[in-house]
Image (cartoon, rainbow, N blue to C red):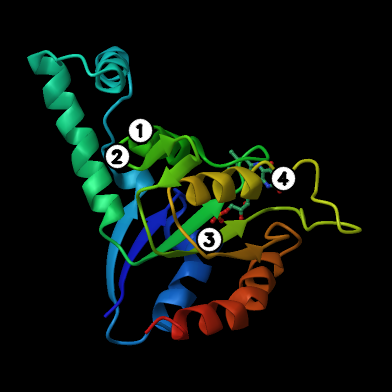
Amino acid sequence: MTSVFYINASPRGAASASTQAADNFLAALPNTATVKRLPLFESDLPEFAAVLASAKQKVMTGAALDDLEAAEWRQITALVDQFTAADHYLLAVPMWNFSIPYKLKHYIDLLTHPGLTFSRDANGVHGLASGSATVIYSRGGDYSPKDGLPDPFDFQSPYLRAWLTMVGLDPINEVLVQRTMAGPEGQADAVGAAQPQLVSLASALV
Ligand SMILES: Cc1cc2nc3c(=O)[nH]c(=O)nc-3n(C[C@H](O)[C@H](O)[C@H](O)COP(=O)(O)O)c2cc1C
């Protein structure tokens, strides 16, 4: 039985292209799969402000946390435990200003700490999560690689791919939902074009 953790980074609900594409993936999952959802724009994520910044420094240097820091750090470890529990990760990620929405960056900042989601030794960095990922990138325009070179304005997929790899996910299957703003049928066409790839990825999860 595969447990899928579905992280949604669009605030647009049912109108969202990445959400519609993710729904197509979920509909094609084997019925033995279980799904947990994290809609980031509906989630009350803790602020990563002074107390957590101090707690992180102390955790990294082995210093003792005070009571307030310990209480906030427990929120971090709970989020990490929730994140690392899955076998497969489904991410619905709009492009915002060539990169990812700030709520997803906030979530990444909450999760990314040595000893929790990655470790480091003489051989480099090792992810402490495991499992595969399907990442849906929705974009108003088209940022496909051209002539074998990545689009210089695509800071969305390289960043997310690097982070998911660092925390240990492999393979990372990427699905493009592009030109969502190209005319009245643009979004439906973009979501429809991604459907075969999404069905194939979902039905392979046994
Ligand atoms: C704040 C914001 C910034 C955006 N920036 C870009 C951009 O840099 N490039 C682009 O192609 N589309 C951009 N768009 C358009 C979205 O990527 C596009 O509408 C996409 O379908 C949104 O995904 P969603 O429908 O799943 O929410 C932006 C949209 C918003 C709301």
Judge the density around disc 1: few (<14), some (14-19), many (≥20) Cα neighbours within 10 Å: some
Q: Quadrant of the C terminus?
A: bottom left
Q: Position of residue 106 (x, y in %)?
A: 41, 34
Residue, far front: 122
Mark sitting on residue 113? 1
Residue, far left: 67
Confirm or reject: label 1 Cβ below 8 Å from ligand 1.
no
Q: Are marks 1 and 4 in contact (CB under 8 Å)?
A: no
* Label located before the other in sequence (3 or 4): 3
Q: Nearer the viewer, mark 3 or mark 1?
A: 1
Q: Are marks 2 and 1 in contact (CB under 8 Å)?
A: yes
Amino acid type of the residue tagged 2 in the rendering: Leu
Label 3 residue SS: strand
Measure how far apart labels 3 and 1 are at the Cα level: 22 Å
Confirm or reject: label 2 Cβ below 8 Å from ligand 1.
no
Label 2 residue SS: loop
Q: Quadrant of the N terminus?
A: bottom left
Measure how far apart labels 2 and 1 are at the Cα level: 6 Å
* Label located before the other in sequence (3 or 1): 1
Q: Which residue is mark 3?
A: 135
Label 1 residue SS: loop
Q: Position of residue 187 (x, y in %)?
A: 65, 65
Q: Which residue is mark 4?
A: 154
